């Protein structure tokens, strides 16, 4: 239960979902909260790009785990529907395999069993068994290990906690070994593991406990958020941007002060709290919650003697992939692409190897296409389509103009070859975003698009804590700490950081 601290001030550094969440919880508990955001809009990596009547979600674009959002808004006596509406997507997504196969993933169990059985005898029944296990693990994980902050060893050395953890939730084994117990066909394995891209991992380095994502995918549904008020064509404010707006509006209601264009350049202890240096001047507070990349905060914002980890520590971490993105406004329609579309090679091992083992631009890429104009007319002008292509690539990869242009041509040709949609002569608006842009815009460590990967050695209590062990009154939230990567996890991370501050300082 959160306690109340009266007349205390908190500076929240960074306006991503972790920072927005922490700010709401702290302000609701009675603290004077100011959120300092580097860029001119809130949302962090969930920024929006608006140009010539097109509106793009620049980062996250999947609305998953609706239960987490219900719980978040419910803490404040509200619901998501008070701020935005949800439209279920059917299909959840479409997969184009590069050998010509095409699969629609739906929440319809009969449809999915038929799809799985068509590839492998007995796979329909195995699909049901897998989902049953996934649901059980999800419900246990969320109750015992996600909503409860267990970021320290003492939080796990508890008989009740250990008894609650089924074998599949323990940090043993990889997703690849787990999925292979159910399905032999490589395409079925890919369908059950594609969500690992959202966790910044690969099948052979992500813990088996993340089988929970299949329950998220097939049972909980995939949605598109729309603003409460209807918008005219070409003035779209839907997508994940609508969720950013909703959380920020909630913050307004509970008393959060937002300052955009206020990049933080330093954090240091003072006799009576903290001095937070920004490009606009000095800000003083009793406490600080940093939603900036954890490594950036430690290496670039804090004095050396107030850091928990040295450069060797951060140099030895496994960072989630960066991305090569092409945002495109296109004349005409882009059928048969769906709102969410995946294009996958038959064997994606080489792509993961180019991210985690031998960094380089993948020769046979797996990639994602987001086409919100298939659902929302307001994100594109009349007679046009709005889409972006996202290719996961290694962090810290050279992404100069020449290699970008070469890879752009490769991806557009690949889209044409494998989906039948040729965009090349129809693009009227185009922007690119890659490794160096993540660094410049978000101070992203090594240009990671997501944060700290969920590898076997970087999950649960093996991630950096949301409490600083070096500086009292300094806390962390976001995708580097617990519970991890993704919009829902960052919302929960903000709650953990706020609870830690209130419990320790109250």
Image (spheres, rainbow, N blue to C red):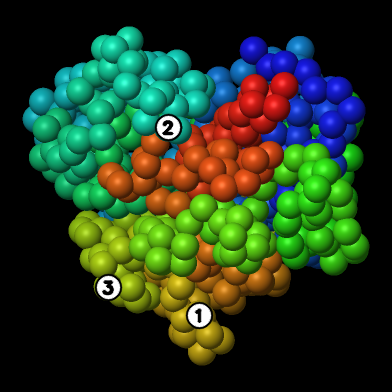
Q: x%, y% of residue 239?
A: 67, 42
**137 and 272: which is toward the camera:** 272
Q: x%, y% of residue 162?
A: 28, 17
Q: Compared with residue 91, is residue 445 higher up or lower down, i.e. above or below?
A: below
Q: What residue lies at 70% left-to-right and 70% top-to-bottom? A: 429
Q: Is residue 62 left or right of residue 46?
A: left
Q: What residue lies at 35% left-to-right and 76% top-to-bottom? A: 360
Q: Compared with residue 172, is residue 274 higher up or lower down, i.e. above or below?
A: below
Q: What residue lies at 50% left-to-right and 68% top-to-bottom? A: 446
Q: What residue lies at 41% left-to-right and 24% top-to-bottom? A: 155
Dot 2 corresponds to which residue? 152
User: Within 10 angstroms of label 3, few (less than 14), some, or many (20 or more) residues?
Assistant: few
- Report if the CB atoms under discs 3 and 1 are less than 8 Å apart: no
Image quadrant where one finds the C terminus: top right
Dot 3 corresponds to which residue? 358
Q: Compared with residue 470, is residue 321 higher up or lower down, i.e. above or below?
A: below
Q: x%, y% of residue 80?
A: 71, 23
For marks 2 and 3 on the same chain, the one whose residue lies earlier in the sequence = 2
Dot 1 corresponds to which residue? 399
Q: Compared with residue 429, is residue 113 higher up or lower down, i.e. above or below?
A: above
Q: x%, y% of residue 231?
A: 84, 40
For marks 3 and 1 on the same chain, the one whose residue lies earlier in the sequence = 3
């Amino acid at each position: 239960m959160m306690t109340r601290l009266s007349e205390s001030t908190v500076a929240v550094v960074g306006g991503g979902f972790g920072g927005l969440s922490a700010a709401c919880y702290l302000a609701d508990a009675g603290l004077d909260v100011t959120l300092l955001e580097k860029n001119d809009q809130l949302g962090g990596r969930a920024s929006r790009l608006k140009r010539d009547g097109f509106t793009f979600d620049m980062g996250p674009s999947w609305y998953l785990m609706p239960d987490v959002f219900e719980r978040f808004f419910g803490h404040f006596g509200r619901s998501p529907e008070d701020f935005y509406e949800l439209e279920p997507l059917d299909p959840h997504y479409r997969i184009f395999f590069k050998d010509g196969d095409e699969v629609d993933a739906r929440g319809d169990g009969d449809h999915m069993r038929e799809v799985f059985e068509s590839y492998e005898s007995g796979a329909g029944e195995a699909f049901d068994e897998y989902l049953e296990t996934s649901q059980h693990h999800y419900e246990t994980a969320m109750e015992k290990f996600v909503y409860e902050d267990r970021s320290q060893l003492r939080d796990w050395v508890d008989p009740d906690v250990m008894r609650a953890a089924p074998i599949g939730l323990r940090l043993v084994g990889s997703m690849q070994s787990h999925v292979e117990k159910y399905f032999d066909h490589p395409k079925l394995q890919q369908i059950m593991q594609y969500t690992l891209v959202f966790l910044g991992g690969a099948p052979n380095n992500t813990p088996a406990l993340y089988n929970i994502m299949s329950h998220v995918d097939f049972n909980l549904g995939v949605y598109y958020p729309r603003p409460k008020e209807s918008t005219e064509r070409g003035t779209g404010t839907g997508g994940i941007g609508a969720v950013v707006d909703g959380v920020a509006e909630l913050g307004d209601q509970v008393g959060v002060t937002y300052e955009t264009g206020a990049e933080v350049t330093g954090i240091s202890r003072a006799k009576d709290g903290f001095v937070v240096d920004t490009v606009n001047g000095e800000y003083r507070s009793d406490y600080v919650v940093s939603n900036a990349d954890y490594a950036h905060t430690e290496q670039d914002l804090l004095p050396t003697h107030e850091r928990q980890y040295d450069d060797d520590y951060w140099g030895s971490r496994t960072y989630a992939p960066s991305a090569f993105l092409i945002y495109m406004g296109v004349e005409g329609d882009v059928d048969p692409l769906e709102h969410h579309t995946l294009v996958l090679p038959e064997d994606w091992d080489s792509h993961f190897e180019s991210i985690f083992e031998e960094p380089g631009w993948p020769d046979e890429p797996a990639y994602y296409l987001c086409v919100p104009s298939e659902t929302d007319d307001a994100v594109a002008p009349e007679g046009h389509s709005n889409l972006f292509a996202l290719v996961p690539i290694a962090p810290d990869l050279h992404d100069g103009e020449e290699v970008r242009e070469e890879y752009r041509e490769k991806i557009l040709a690949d889209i044409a070859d494998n989906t039948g949609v040729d965009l090349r002569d129809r693009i009227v608006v185009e922007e690119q975003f890659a490794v160096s842009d993540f660094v410049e815009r978000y101070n992203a460590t090594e240009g990671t698009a997501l944060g700290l990967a969920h590898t076997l050695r970087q999950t649960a209590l093996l991630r950096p804590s949301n409490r600083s062990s070096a500086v009292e009154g300094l806390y962390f939230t976001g995708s580097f700490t617990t519970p991890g990567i993704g919009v829902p996890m960052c919302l929960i991370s903000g709650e953990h950081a706020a609870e830690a501050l209130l419990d320790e300082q109250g």
